[in-house]
Amino acid sequence: MISNERPSPFGRRHYGQPRPQVKEDTLKSDKVQIERKTFLFSLKENPRGRFLRITEDVNGRHDNIIIPATGLDEFKKAFDEMVKTANEAPEKAHGG
């Protein structure tokens, strides 16, 4: 079963209602600064399971992606391929 197919312990949400607070435990966290961006990695757990939250912070603006723990190996494989290609491919001249 795919993690997002599990029924929520909070029932169905109706549009416009605030989400109920879900207790999350942080299992591990790390921070990486790249140029003007800060990336926060937090491995967390809640009643629905474990997940990795990646938060991008650029001048106080935050964007998040959440990856269920069941997909981390697949995510890492795709990420490793991107790193490999970035390191092998010569940079193209920008402009035009």
Image (tube, rainbow, N blue to C red):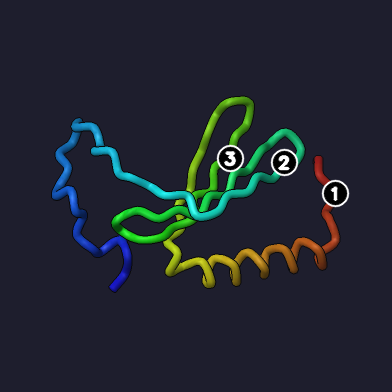
Viewer-nearest residue: 77 or 7: 7
Element type at mark 2: strand
Q: Secondary structure at mark 1?
A: loop
Residue 82 appears left or right of 86: left
Residue 89: percent from left, percent from top: 81, 64
Q: What residue did someone put label 2 on? A: 33
**Label 3 vs 1, first from the N-terminus:** 3
Task: From the top left corner, tell me how far across and down residue 32 is, in percent.
Answer: 69, 45
Task: Tell me if residue 82 comes above or below residue 19 in the rendering.
Answer: below
Q: Residue at x 83, y 54 (%)?
A: 92
Residue ID at (23%, 32%): 18
In three-dimensional space, the C-alpha distance between marks 3 and 2, rounded to whole angstroms, equals 10 Å
Mark 3 vs mark 1: give the one in front. 3
Name which of mark 3 and mark 2 comes first in the sequence.
2
Label 3 is placed on what type of residue?
Answer: Glu
Q: CA distance from mark 3 to mark 1?
A: 27 Å
Q: Residues within 10 Å of mark 3 (few under 14, many from 20)?
A: many
User: CB under 8 Å between callouts 3 and 1?
Assistant: no
Q: Nearer the viewer, residue 43 or 80?
A: 43
User: In this image, 18 relative to 61: left or right?
Assistant: left
Image quadrant occupied by the C terminus:
top right
Residue at 58% across, 49% down: 29
Cα separation, mark 1 vs mark 2, equals 26 Å
Residue drawn where x is 81% and y is 44% of the image: 94
Q: Earlier in the sequence, mark 1 or mark 2?
A: 2
> How many numbered marks appear?
3
> To which residue does mark 3 refer?
56
Label 1 crowd bin: few (<14), some (14–19), many (20+), radius 10 Å: few
Q: Which residue is mark 1?
A: 93
Decide: is 94 above or below 47: above
